[in-house]
Image (cartoon, grey):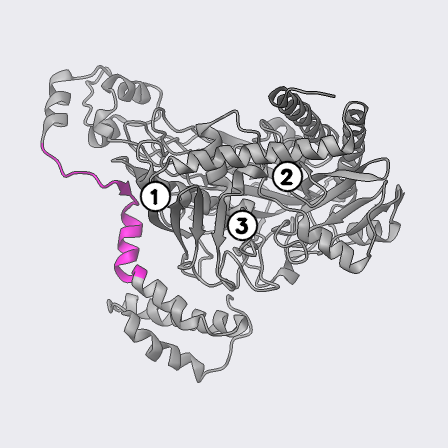
Amino acid sequence: MNRNEAVFLQVLNSRLEAIVTELAENVLRAAHSTFIKETWDIAALLMTPDGEVFSCPREIAAKRIGMHLGMALQALGAEQPGTIAPGDIFITNDPQSTGGLATHLNDMFLFKPVFWGETLVCFALVFVHLSDVGGLVPGSLSPAAVDIYQEGLRIPPMHLYRRCELVADLRRLLLTNSRVPAQTWGDVTAVVGALNVCERRIGALAEEYSPAEFAAGTQRLLNVSEQRARELIGAIKDGSYRFVDYIDGLPNMEPIRLALVLTIAGEEMILDFSGSDPEVGAAYNLYSYSIDGHWGLTRALADYLQGLDPDIPWNSGLVRPLRIRAPKGSVVNPEADAACGMRVATYFRIYYMTFGALAEAAPGTIPASGPAEAGIMLIATHDRVTGKRRINVGQAMFGGSGGRPRDDGFDGNEMVSWYLRNVPMEILEQEVDVRFLSYAIAPGTGGAGRFRGGHGTRISVEFLTPATVTIRGLQRHQFRAWGVEGGTAGARGEVHVRQHHEGERSLEAVTLLDMREHDVLTVVTPGGGGCGDPFQRPAEAVAADVREGLISAAQAQADYGVVLAADGAIDADRTEARRSAPRAAPPEIDYGPERIEFERWWTPALYEGIADLLRSKNAAERKWRRRHLLEAIRKRVAQGVPTRPEDLPHLLAEPARGRKPQAEYA
């Protein structure tokens, strides 16, 4: 049959998007756990027989187009040759045997081969974040885990259903290792049902297309996206652009340094993370295997390219021109068995680092940084009536996003975690014995700018029964979200707890917290950075922010040069005088005073010297030697003594004579 090529591709792409969107919707409607049915932490994808994403929802679920099923399929073939058949459904959550398809153990991947007759035409894949897969803490995810074995059950790629028959032993193994087995199995069966419906929807296309036509069409969609991505990249100025940022670590460890050199060369981009820290003995490692286009390292660029051309088919063709250089043994490409539960902090930070590098290559098109935070509070209690364990998400807590080149940042929401939703308080209070005392915008937390940064949120929760609480993903409690083009950095996050009728105290992190009845936990999430000179923000917009309680009159005057009378009216003369007075030129990127002070002692040259010195060590030795090296530098900082790169060999020799510690972090 003769077809117009452009029309054929448009119709095919639209039908595929409808099918994969329905796949995601069905999971969300049928899931049991709050974190899936309310917060939406899932992804739904259609993949070629060799594992490349050719369709992904645009509006719901995580857009993980850089995922690749290839290594998982190889692992299946190595264990069970010729194993893929109609009626099969496979399951895995193992980062190592899937080559970084999975990146932490709570993300459970289920994928189903779709056949037309005897021909495998594609895979339908869903991942869902299961509430608990075992491990150190309720909910499985603790930043203090020192290796992957502490984070829960690992399942390499294997059959969950074999020719439509459930593998009962695997089901029993999975549920035995979950603190909430009924909830876990409810979520898994929701995915199974959605995959079966998706298989039927794709099967209906066989009435119009042959397997060869379908395969050719999906490949052409991938090629169209790749070609358009290359054209967009080719329009950006060639060059190498460097950006450095830090992940908040645990209270007893230094911030984790990430370094990116983004090179634009013709129609390709190279993301080189060679200056980043070695892997750490905590849960911040990201399994990428330095795979080109890996979703955890390229999501910002995929979003950027789609922002330039919203009509690009949303598939892995977009990331084909993106090359990755992530050294083995680094925090973005760890050795085997590294802990990885908090990898969200790493890839969220890389998201904004990529924008930071692009800011020099494409000025005027890049937003300021958001906090890159999705603080997930998880509450474990026992039901007061039945005595059964209850584990549920207490809220997904977001900071404000960065100011944008033509608009303010979003209050209480993040671009990097846009697909996650907040949970209505009424549902949470029904699911867990808590009372929410406040859930509101935290005024004054957004960075000042021509377009101000989004404000964070303030959440206070009272516990009505004893509970165990963890909060994963808290970030920007050490260094602020940076502002661009004259905008200032946002405010840092805060955590406060009032326990046992005692006074309020502050916490640096929440790894595992025991709460009694009527204890109160308060979290203030960070604000986003501002974009553009604050003195160029219209005075009327500043006055409106004051009227709405988003900033104070003092902030209006200090940060924006807008002077208000007692009744809130703008004092035009004093405002004009203040705004026209000479002042120092603002930096292109404002990192905030905390980072400036930190880098007085922990210079980029020092960090790079540490990495160079330890690169030749094996993974285990590298970890414990690095720990002692950092402790020695920390002592010198406390004494006011700077450390130069040439001092490092002497400092490294000191702990080498001591006893090797059993774990990196106590």
Earlier along the polypeptide chain: callout 1 or callout 3? 1
State the extent of the magenta-drawn residues as a range: 582-604
State the image coordinates of residue 634 (x, y, percent, origin top left): 34, 67
Q: Earlier in the sequence, mark 2 or mark 3?
A: 2
In the image, what residue type sits under mark 1?
Asp
Q: CA distance from mark 1 to mark 3?
A: 20 Å
Rendered position, 219 above or below 407? below
Disc 1 versus disc 3: nearer the observer: 1
Q: Is residue 641 magenta?
A: no
Tell me if 355 is positioned left or right of 497 in this view: left
What number is the disc on residue 53? Answer: 2
Q: What residue is pinned by disc 3?
A: 292
User: Which residue in the protein does label 1 denote?
Assistant: 238
User: How far is disc 2 from disc 1 in space, using C-alphas?
Assistant: 28 Å
Question: Which of the 4 image quadrants contains residue 17?
Answer: top right
Helix, strand or loop at disc 1?
Answer: loop
* Residue located at (34% from left, 48% from top): 241
Furthest residue toward front: 2
> Type of residue at label 2?
Val
Q: Compared to 72, does 540 lie above or below?
A: above
Please count the marks in the image: 3
Query: Residue at the spot x=47%, y=37% of the render?
Result: 230
